[in-house]
Image: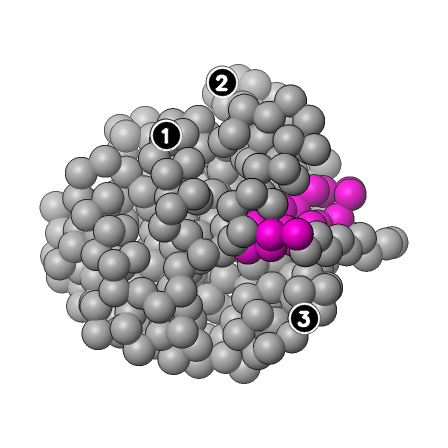
Amino acid sequence: MKILGIGNAIVDVICKVDDSFIEQNNLAKSTMKLFFDENEFKSLLLNLKIEKTVSGGSVANSIVGLSQLGNQVGFIGKVSDDKFGREYEEGLKKENVEYFYSKKNEELPTGTCLILVTPDSERTMCTFLGTAGKINANDIDSGAIKKSEIILLEGYLWDEGEPKKAFDKAINNANIVAMSLSDQFCVDRHKINFLELVKNKLDITFANEQEIKSLIQAKDFKEVIDFSRQLKKLIIITRGEKGAIAIQGEEIVETGILQNLKILDLTGAGDLFAAGFLHGHVNQLSIKESLEKGTEMSSKVIQQIGARL
């Protein structure tokens, strides 16, 4: 297998809202908020019109993108044997993704992410992890990991306790480890642990400019470049309108963005960028070509609603 993703198995529920809804519910625009109370989460959904429901989760979106590009891929993520859990599994199978997890009745329901899209196409996410956040070492199929060229992890999944043990088992059995830092919220919450991962455990790190600056507490982007060069690992950073950059030791490669796009929804832009880049990487394309493939994939997904093509 080319790439095995390990991440939160979450069903995305996409709704269009105006800015006042974000303000009234004390949400920080363009970020992700975790909900620990299922009832509080459900009350948010009450008066909203659902545009679309789709199997989601950051790394799962990347894995589906890789499958659509013709790569043999798999996914590990925890769901419950409920309506959303069954839909989730079906969604992966339809996309030719091998699912390495046997669902059963869990105490908590399958995870859900409410994606609120404002008129400026920004997305604000409200996530109730449900059983997805309860992943443990027993859920990790080490045989599948050993047979994969690369594993792709997500920062969203990392947490103290059982999820950390699941991460450790995955990393210890992997050939090459890639991870997305996922969100500034995650970076700020787990800064010491994420820094340890980036420095000592990961071969490939995906981040946006905000996330990597926050991780190393950089004042400017030059500090980010200096930090990345010293690591001598592959660091890929998306920079919004400034394009994207890959740093591997002394090799620094940049690419611009595609122009004149009709942007509808930024959900999944980073996930599909990672898919495009990793497609290039496992198929022996150059770093420049891999960056361009990432840009092409992210440009496609932001011109539609939802995080999958």
**Secondary structure beneath disc 1?**
helix
Name the residue located 32 percent from the left edge and 42 percent from the top edge: 158
Q: Nearer the viewer, residue 227 or 189?
A: 227
Ranked by sequence position, the earlier of labels 2 and 3 is 2
Name the residue located 18 percent from the left edge and 38 percent from the top edge: 161
Q: 93 above or below 108?
A: below
| Numbered tag placed on residue 26 in the rendering | 2
Colouring used for the render: one colour
What is the crowding at mark 2: few (fewer than 14 residues within 10 Å), some, or many (at least 20)?
A: few
**Picture coordinates of residue 263 (x, y %)?**
75, 50
Q: Residue furthest right?
A: 260
Q: What's the magenta region?
A: 234-250
Circle 3 residue: 286
- Label 2 to label 3, Cα distance in Å? 44 Å
Residue 56 appears in the rendering: no
Q: Nearer the viewer, mark 2 or mark 3?
A: 3
Q: Nearer the viewer, mark 1 or mark 2?
A: 1
Q: Is residue 110 magenta?
A: no
- Label 1 to label 2, Cα distance in Å? 28 Å
- Label 3 to label 1, Cα distance in Å? 32 Å
Q: Nearer the viewer, residue 49 or 90?
A: 90
Circle 1 residue: 192
* Type of amino acid at the residue the image marks with label 1: Ile
**Picture coordinates of residue 150 (x, y %)?**
41, 68
Residue 280 appears in the rendering: yes
**Picture coordinates of residue 103 (x, y %)?**
18, 64
